Image (cartoon, grey):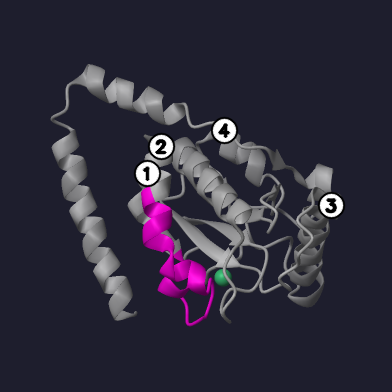
Amino acid sequence: MSHDHSIRRRMLFAGAAGLAAATAVPLTARAAQASQGARVAQPAIDGTAQWGASPPAGTISLVQRRPAAIIVHHTVSSNSTDYSRAQAHSHARWVQALHQDDNGWVDTGYNFVVSRGGYLTEGRHRSLETLLGGTNFVLGAHTSGANDFGIGISNEGAYHDGAVPPAAQWASLVQICAFVASQYAITPTEIYGHMDFNNTLCPGIIHDMLPQLRDEVADAIG
Ligand SMILES: [Zn+2]
């Protein structure tokens, strides 16, 4: 486990202490906070049927609790300058084919994908329906050892070699993270990058931007 990760672990404990302090907040104030969280607008997310997904190659497994963390990835696709919804759908099909056909997985490994144009797509089937329910989530295949507590959100493109995410993609990443955090009561401090858990370059420079992502998600949640 990296030194960086141990620092984050300590931050998690600091967060737990903060949570304990929050129990002293009057009930009405906490109810107000909860309703404020629930007001995070649901961003448009194109489901598997909308982007023409292939059926799962087997059973989709659900984890019967809320995820405790958001884990951010990049798909290592080409950095397309086609920012259209059609490209978002094409990219979603490319990822699914890679994961099903090349990796032999049941379905797309990620729960959600953000296109370079800022379009959001459902990854593994049932990820959207469970997100809207807010009580359980789909077991993905994106982070070894963390799939049963981390929900995986990936970004179209390759960000380990100098490129930075387009502004529209970043804005949608903030939106989906805020909505997921709100639906599942995940605190923004529990947003991680793939490299926090596995020996990988993923998600590239987006990993350096995680403090900014946590701040912007916290602002969005209010
Ligand atoms: Zn990754």
Asked if the residue at label 1 sits under 8 Å from ligand 1, the reply is no
Q: CA distance from mark 3 to mark 1?
A: 31 Å
Circles 2, 4 touching at the beta carbon (< 8 Å): no
163 w.r.t. 10: above or below: below
- The amino acid type, in three-letter code, at marker 4 is Gly
Label placed on residue 9: none
- The amino acid type, in three-letter code, at marker 3 is Ala
Identify residue for label 1.
Answer: 218
Q: Secondary structure at mark 1?
A: helix
| Residue 64 can be seen, yes or no | no
Q: Name the front one of labels 2 and 4.
A: 2
Circles 2, 3 touching at the beta carbon (< 8 Å): no
Q: CA distance from mark 3 to mark 4?
A: 28 Å
Identify residue for label 4.
Answer: 133
Q: Which part of the image, by quadrant, shows the N terminus?
A: bottom left
- Relative to 40, 84 lies left or right: right
Q: CA distance from mark 1 to mark 4?
A: 22 Å
| Residue 113 can be seen, yes or no | yes
Ranked by sequence position, the earlier of labels 2 and 3 is: 3
